[in-house]
Image: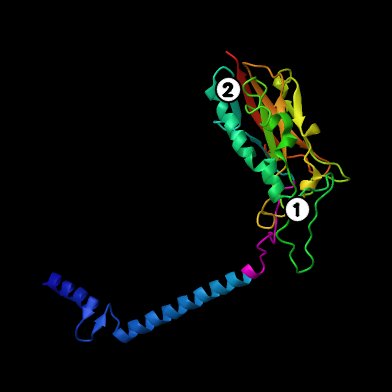
């Protein structure tokens, strides 16, 4: 009997036919609760939409309103190895180095002289290419300076389509990461790249050749104004050719940016103003 009474109590709580209450509330009570939460969540959605609208009015489509940029930009190499920053191949095995040549060829296609002359301008070298806005009038899209593939000479792939890999004198291309508004040199001094072997491999690196000469990033490619403002921007490159590097051994190499306006990178960040990679060329 007690179980029947308890069961009847639960049934009555869920639906009471005498008072016509569902879960202890009448239809009008449930209606008022639902109406309250409907109005409440509409209000919250409206506040969120208003907040987002006000925030978006402060943003510029072409340039970040707030920019917490690194003092020292990162560097990267091309081609990248199959296992990260390790370039390992055998001169006797075409398939081991041809993938690097193909990767460089694909990477340099946008730098073909015909493409650059169609999209970009010939600029005055050795000075910044400023394109400032005039008050509220935006000077967009901004023009970009030509970086022609031929500047890389022996590492352009135009005279040696194997980029020296077949002969054991490979080319490595270095680029400095894009940073909006970066002025990498002062007093007319352009930044440059310097590569060398790490201490334990100092006698293995041999002679190194740079393209353009001295491994410089010309000032005319700066400042960078952003992807939307400077649609056709061509990042300047520096190519390094290792002419007689020691073969059949690992050679650990580090390339650094040399500049009078870029702080030396922190040792905690191995990509700040530097890039390290391993190069191994087997001949047997």
Q: Secondary structure at mark 2?
A: strand
The reply to whether residue 167 is visible in this rendering is yes
Q: Which residue is mark 2?
A: 89
Task: Report x, y in % for residue 214.
Answer: 80, 32
Task: Report x, y in % for residue 84.
Answer: 57, 33
Range shown magenta: 56-71
Which of the two discs, 2 and 1, sits closer to the camera?
Answer: 2
3 displayed left or right of 46: left
Q: Residue at x 64, y 35 (%)?
A: 78
Q: Is residue 123 above or below residue 88?
A: below
Instruction: Report the coloring of the rendering.
Output: rainbow
Cβ atoms at labels 2 and 1 below 8 Å apart? no
Q: Quadrant of residue 251?
A: top right
Task: Identify the disc placed on residue 181.
Answer: 1
Q: Which sits in the foreground, 63 or 91?
A: 91
Q: Is residue 42 above or below residue 262?
A: below
Residue lying at the far left of the rendered structure: 1
Quadrant for the N terminus, please.
bottom left
Q: Quadrant of residue 229?
A: bottom right
């Amino acid at each position: 009997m007690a179980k029947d009474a308890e069961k009847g109590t639960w049934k009555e709580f869920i639906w009471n036919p005498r008072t016509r209450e569902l879960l202890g509330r009448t239809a009008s009570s449930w209606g008022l609760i639902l109406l309250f939460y409907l109005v409440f969540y509409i209000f919250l959605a409206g506040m969120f939409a208003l907040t987002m609208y006000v925030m978006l009015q402060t943003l510029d489509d072409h340039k970040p309103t707030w920019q917490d940029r690194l003092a020292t930009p990162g560097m990267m190499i091309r081609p990248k190895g199959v296992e990260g920053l390790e370039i390992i191949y055998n001169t006797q095995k075409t398939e081991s180095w041809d993938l690097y040549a193909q990767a460089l060829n694909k990477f340099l296609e946008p730098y073909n002289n015909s493409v650059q002359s169609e999209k970009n301008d010939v600029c005055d070298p050795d000075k910044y290419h400023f394109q400032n806005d005039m008050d509220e009038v935006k000077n967009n899209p901004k023009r970009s300076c030509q970086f022609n593939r031929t500047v890389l000479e022996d590492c352009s792939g135009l005279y040696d389509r194997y980029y020296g890999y077949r002969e054991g004198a490979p080319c490595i291309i270095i680029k400095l990461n894009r940073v909006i508004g970066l002025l990498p040199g002062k007093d007319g001094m352009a930044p440059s790249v310097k590569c060398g072997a790490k201490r334990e491999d100092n006698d293995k690196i041999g002679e190194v050749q740079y393209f353009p000469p001295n491994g410089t990033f010309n000032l005319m490619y700066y400042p960078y104004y952003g992807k939307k403002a400077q649609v056709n921007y061509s990042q300047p490159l520096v190519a390094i050719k290792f002419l007689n590097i020691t073969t059949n051994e690992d050679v650990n190499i580090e390339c650094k940016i040399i500049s009078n306006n870029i702080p030396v990178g922190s040792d905690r960040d191995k990509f700040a103003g530097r890039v390290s990679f391993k190069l191994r060329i087997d001949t047997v």
